[in-house]
Image (tube, grey):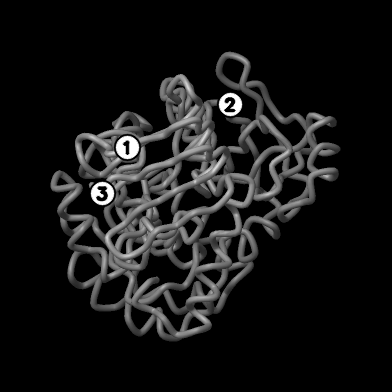
Amino acid sequence: MTQTDHTYAVLLAGGGGTRLWPKSRNKTPKQFLKLFGDETMLQYTVHRVRKLVPWERLIIVTNEKYRSEVEKQLPEVPKSNIIAEPEKKDTALAMLVGSLYAQSLDPDAVVINSASDHVVADINEFVRVMQAAVRVASKKENLVTVGITPSRPATGFGYIKIGEDLAKLDRGLSLFTVASFTEKPNEATARGFISTGKYFWNANMYVWSAEALVSAFKTYLPSLYESTKVLSGLTGSDFAKALPKIYAAAETISIDYAISEKATNLVLIPGDFGWNDVGDWKIVYDLEKKDISGNVIVSDDAEAQVVALASYDNFVHANGRLVALVGVNDMIVVDTDEIVLVIPKSKSQDVKKIVEYLKAKGTTEYL
């Protein structure tokens, strides 16, 4: 067997994506939406990761209420490899459970972790970087994170500062120690970070051997390690039956707080492959093709019914009805069966405030 025979991928597909409301809602979170062409975000992610692992080594961690949608969108994935979380407990438990399942299938499993709702422009470079990360992680000594080379002073991402240059890898890639983490800095701080050349975006893109991750949980979060030991060696329905008790007792904590910011054996490989997390409608606008007036017009139907007169640099997501704009610039318009969203592009991050308002009012039918 080659080292790649032990490579698995765990895709997290249980999130909500509130900044893409009203298309992304509890019943249809963004990973199941067709935002860029004929395939959903989840399907695009799988096609990218499939260049690294075969179908039988692809594991999807989702929420119980999305299991049928995952099965529908990814019929090639073995149903036993779709892990349905009984409740949401953030990324630490989701990634641990995914790695434990891979380890039950293969004690030497090396796991590539990825969100299911991100985009990558340069697939070949993505594959090259991830293969390098797998080679490092397969030695079972280090947890590896792929830090994204920042293209702008983004304030919506966390940043990772690198330390010592440990080794030169494949064709110009380097391996660094991790010095520190910083959560979502302001713009001035982010600009300062980028100017040093020592900071990378934290995309939660981790590669590790299942053995090394379990060891890290044993050291840094022993309570979760102890509660999940029962999963060792279980697969299929036996694995699924053990989850409710574990999830009911587990704390809600991210992988960064639980492990990454504490681990002394975390290393970083820079990745520059056009990554984006598609966190709001302005990012969708930025990534889509514009017409001669700078407008992006998309639709769930084959043809969008949109008239835009003297209107420039807008994003319009139509839904079959005629949407008409006159003298409108730099706006986002999203039409759905129940909801119409109108917001300036510059305020696209504030869509989350609408969701929070509706949640506070108890109008859950719109969430």
Question: What secondary structure is found at the residue carrying circle 2?
Answer: loop
Residue at (67% x, 33% y) in the render: 150
Instruction: Judge whether residue 287 can be spotted in this image.
Output: yes
Question: What secondary structure is found at the residue carrying circle 3?
Answer: loop
Above or below, 288 relative to 106: above
Residue at (34% x, 43% y) in the render: 41
Question: What secondary structure is found at the residue carrying circle 1?
Answer: helix
Q: CA distance from mark 2 to mark 3?
A: 40 Å
Residue 19 drawn at (x, y percent): 51, 57
Instruction: Judge whether residue 138 can be spotted in this image.
Output: no
Q: Disc 1 marks which amino acid?
A: Tyr
Residue 44's tag is: 1
Label whose residue precedes the other's in the sequence (2 or 3): 2
In this rendered view, identify the residue nearer to me: 123 or 16: 16
Residue 181 drawn at (x, y percent): 74, 52
Circle 2 is placed at which residue position?
A: 272
Q: CA distance from mark 1 to mark 3?
A: 28 Å
